[in-house]
């Protein structure tokens, strides 16, 4: 041990002072460990826990965002499908309304045409009756003039009555009894 003491003295170190410094260092180390290291270590541990929790929360938020994006895409797809269905239904409804309107217009046109035909037939029949009555009157007066020259008044009235009956019944062109 003396060799060690000589070597330490050679470097200018005193043994008692050196041992006192070692003891002081050990005491200081114990105090620092007891009062400083534990709180700092605990604070570091808490920070590390908070950082891990923050990273975990960020990862959870990222996953939640992915899920929300997927849901958004699904909702948009569903909304697009619903909108397409509504558009298709609207188109079908418009087509149906168009078709019904066209059919109604055709029916009304047919009814108007049918009414016009009936009116035309009625007018034609009325005109035909008037022409017939006029022709009967004209025939009556012609036959009356011709017969007055050929027959007596009584014969003329009999022949005239028969001719009028024939004309009113449809004329001489039809088969008679």
Image (cartoon, rainbow, N blue to C red):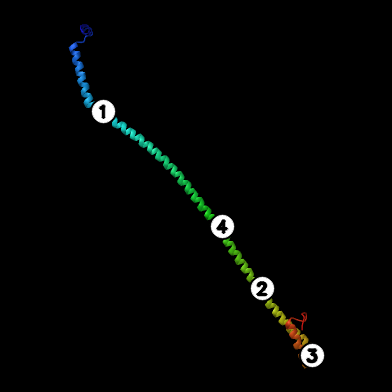
Coordinates of residue 7 in the picture (x, y in percent): 23, 7
Q: Is residue 57 above or below residue 3?
A: below
Question: Circle 1: is it few (<14), some (14-19), or many (20+) Cα within 10 Å?
Answer: few
Front-most of 149 and 17?
Answer: 17
Element type at mark 4: helix
Pointer 2: what residue?
A: 120
Indicate which disc, 3 or 2, sits on the residue closer to the N terminus: 2
Coordinates of residue 8 in the picture (x, y in percent): 22, 9
Q: How much space separates mark 1 and mark 2, taking CA atoms?
A: 115 Å
Element type at mark 1: helix
Pointer 1: what residue?
A: 40
Front-most of 24 and 153?
Answer: 24
Coordinates of residue 170 in the picture (x, y in percent): 74, 81
Indicate which disc, 4 or 1, sits on the residue closer to the N terminus: 1
Q: How much space separates mark 2 and mark 4, taking CA atoms?
A: 37 Å
Q: Nearer the viewer, mark 3 or mark 2?
A: 2
Are dots 1 and 3 in contact, CB under 8 Å? no
Element type at mark 2: helix
Q: Nearer the viewer, mark 1 or mark 3?
A: 1
Indicate which disc, 4 or 3, sits on the residue closer to the N terminus: 4
The quarter of the picture where the C terminus appears is bottom right
In the displayed structure, does residue 11 sit left or right of residue 63? left
Residue 117, which numbered label?
Answer: none
Pointer 3: what residue?
A: 148
Furthest residue to the front? 1
**In the picture, residue 18 is in which quadrant?**
top left
Q: How much space separates mark 4 and mark 1, taking CA atoms?
A: 80 Å
């Amino acid at each position: 041990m003396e060799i060690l003491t000589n070597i330490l003295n050679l470097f200018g170190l005193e043994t008692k002072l050196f041992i006192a410094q070692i003891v002081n260092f050990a005491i200081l180390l114990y105090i620092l460990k007891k009062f400083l290291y534990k709180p700092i270590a605990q604070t570091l541990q808490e920070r590390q826990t908070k950082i891990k929790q923050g990273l975990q929360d960020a990862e959870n938020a990222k996953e939640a965002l992915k899920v929300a994006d997927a849901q958004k895409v699904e909702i948009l797809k569903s909304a697009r499908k619903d909108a397409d269905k509504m558009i298709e239904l609207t188109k079908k409804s418009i087509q149906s309304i168009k078709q019904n309107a066209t059919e109604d217009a055709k029916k009304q046109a047919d009814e108007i045409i049918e009414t016009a035909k009936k009116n035309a037939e009625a007018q034609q029949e009325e005109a035909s009756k008037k022409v017939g009555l006029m022709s009967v009157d004209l025939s009556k007066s012609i036959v009356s003039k011709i017969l007055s020259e050929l027959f007596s008044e009584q014969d003329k009235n009999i022949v005239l009555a028969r001719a009028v009956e024939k004309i009113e019944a449809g004329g001489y062109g039809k088969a008679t009894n």
